[in-house]
Amino acid sequence: MRKIQSRFLIPNGFTALSMFFGLSSIAASAESNFVLAAWMIVWGVLLDKLDGTSARLLNACSEFGVEFDSFADFVVFGMAPAALVYFRLSQMAIFQEKWHTWMMAGVSLYAIATAVRLARFNIVDPPDGDRFFHGIPTTVCGGFIGLLFLVWDSQGLPVAMLQAFPIIMVTCAVAMVSNIRLSKLKSHKRLSLNLIQGSSLAAAFVLAPLMLLPEFLLGLEISYVSIGLVWGFASSRERDVVDVDADEPRIA
């Protein structure tokens, strides 16, 4: 048996902990402990960031790590959000009587889209993959659903607003398997951008473990996605212009 190198234990440990939170989130949802279930999904987002960062810093990237990470992502960002929405909406009379099939279709499509996305990018290396996500990542969608539920709960919003969650699940499913370009979190040449990005990450790593200010965390995620989509769209337009210019015949 090949000896396991110690440097691989740290990133894979973060991945294992993320899977643990995903499974615990599903159990919490089944027991109607929805707030804890949602926070566990958010904690999974942080651990997903830690396992990738630690793997790169320790030079501990491996095929096993990639596959293990995909399994964990499916549990914590696919099954756990689906369970959160399913078990919470199942307590509402309208989903028990009239819209049960619609609810099942929404959460099922979301979970399937998560699996499709993870499988797709385990075998496909998209162009500019080092700079952009193609489609919205499972971490972003899972974190968004968890934080959206936490904001609804903390603000005491009307229960009727939960009826929109199947639509949100379907929208996230389509976004995950689409070819929308989303800029990745990378270091920039501008110090100001690095400071904003670094302080936002630091705030997330402080607030989420303490289960504080989901509104602020949701605002950070929405801001990142909005800016990242604009940046990705502008970059794709610029690339298309360059490609067209390159195809034009040149007159000597």
Image (spheres, rainbow, N blue to C red):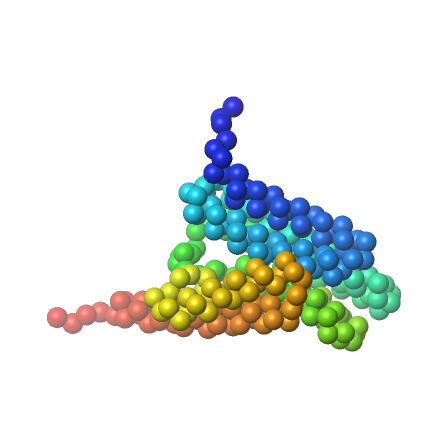
**Front-most of residues 197 and 152:** 197
**Front-most of residues 6 and 248:** 6
Please state, as top left, top right, bottom left or bottom right, where the C terminus lies in the image: bottom left
Quadrant hosting residue 139: bottom right
* Rendered position, 1 above or below 15: above
- Could you tell me residue 131's position as x and y percent? 41, 60
- Could you tell me residue 216's position as x and y percent? 61, 71
Q: Residue at x 48, y 60 (%)?
A: 134
The answer to whether residue 93 is left or right of residue 36 is right
Count of numbered tags: 0
Q: Residue at x 58, y 46 (%)?
A: 15
Quadrant hosting residue 206: bottom right
Quadrant hosting residue 42: bottom right
The answer to whether residue 19 shows anywhere in this view is yes
Residue farthest along the left direction in this orientation: 252
- Could you tell me residue 180's position as x and y percent? 50, 65
- Could you tell me residue 243's position as x and y percent? 31, 67
The answer to whether residue 197 is left or right of residue 240 is right
Residue farthest along the top direction in this orientation: 1
The answer to whether residue 100 shows anywhere in this view is no
**Front-most of residues 149 and 189:** 189
Q: Residue at x 22, y 69 (%)?
A: 249
Q: Residue at x 52, y 48 (%)?
A: 51
The answer to whether residue 171 is left or right of residue 224 is right
